Amino acid sequence: MNWCGRRGALGYTWKTYGPFCAPEGYHNLSYVSDVNPEETTFTIKDSYGLVKAKGGMSDFPATFHTIAPSKFCSPEGGLSDALKIQRSRKLFGAHDQYINRAELEHQGLPIPQDMQPPLSVWDNSGGQKSREPRRAQ
C-alpha cells in the first residue's frame, strides 16, 4: 500500500491510499475520524479517475462498485475484447462524468452516471438528476 500524507496550508491533512487491484464487484469502506468528523470528507476514484463514492463521515460505511480492467493490473495474456470495450467505456466515462448532463444529452452521448452499475457517482445534473432510462432518438 502506498501512503502519502501532506499538511496543507490551513493545517489540514489529506491522504491517498493505493493503487489497488480491486476485483470487479462491490466493495465497502469504513473509516473513523478522530477529532473533527465534521471536517472529514472522502472521494474514491478508480484508476481511470471515475468517481466511485464520495461524502463525509455520515456516509460511512461507503459501498462502491469497480469494473474491470484496472489501469494498474492486466490479466496474463492481455485484455480480452470484452475488457477492451470496458476500458474504452471507462476512458470516455472518466472524461464525460464532469460534463453537464444536459450537454451530454444534447450531443446524444451516454451518461456515465446512468449506466448500471454507474461508472461514476459524480453529480453532473446541474441540480436535477434524472434516473429515467434514456430513449433512442
Image (cartoon, rainbow, N blue to C red):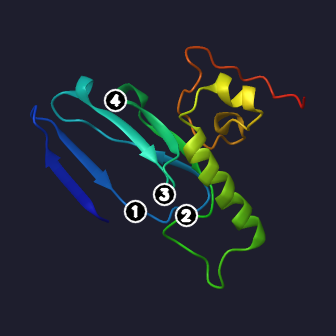
Residue at position x 73%, y 38% in the image = 110
* Quadrant of res 113: top right
Disc ID at residue 70: 2
Which three-letter amino acid code belongs to the residue tagged 3? Ser
Mark 4–mark 1 distance (CA, rounded to whole Å): 23 Å
Q: What residue is disc 4 on?
A: 57
- Earlier-in-chain disc, 4 versus 3: 3
Mark 4–mark 3 distance (CA, rounded to whole Å): 23 Å
Q: Is residue 69 left or right of residue 16?
A: right
Disc ID at residue 19: 1
Residue at position x 72%, y 39% in the image = 115
Mark 2–mark 1 distance (CA, rounded to whole Å): 10 Å
Q: Is residue 67 above or below residue 114?
A: below
| Tag in front: 2 or 4 | 2
Q: What residue is disc 3 on?
A: 47
- Earlier-in-chain disc, 3 versus 1: 1
Which three-letter amino acid code belongs to the residue tagged 1? Pro
| Tag in front: 3 or 1 | 3
* Horizontal and vertical percent position of residue 18: 36, 60
Q: Does the residue at mark 3 contact the one at mark 1 (Cβ under 8 Å)? A: yes
Mark 2–mark 3 distance (CA, rounded to whole Å): 6 Å
- Earlier-in-chain disc, 2 versus 3: 3
Q: Does the residue at mark 2 contact the one at mark 3 (Cβ under 8 Å)? A: yes
Which three-letter amino acid code belongs to the residue tagged 2? Ser
Residue in the foreground of this view, choosing between 68 and 89? 89
Q: Is residue 73 left or right of residue 13?
A: right
Residue in the foreground of this view, choosing between 20 and 98? 98
Q: Does the residue at mark 2 contact the one at mark 1 (Cβ under 8 Å)? A: yes
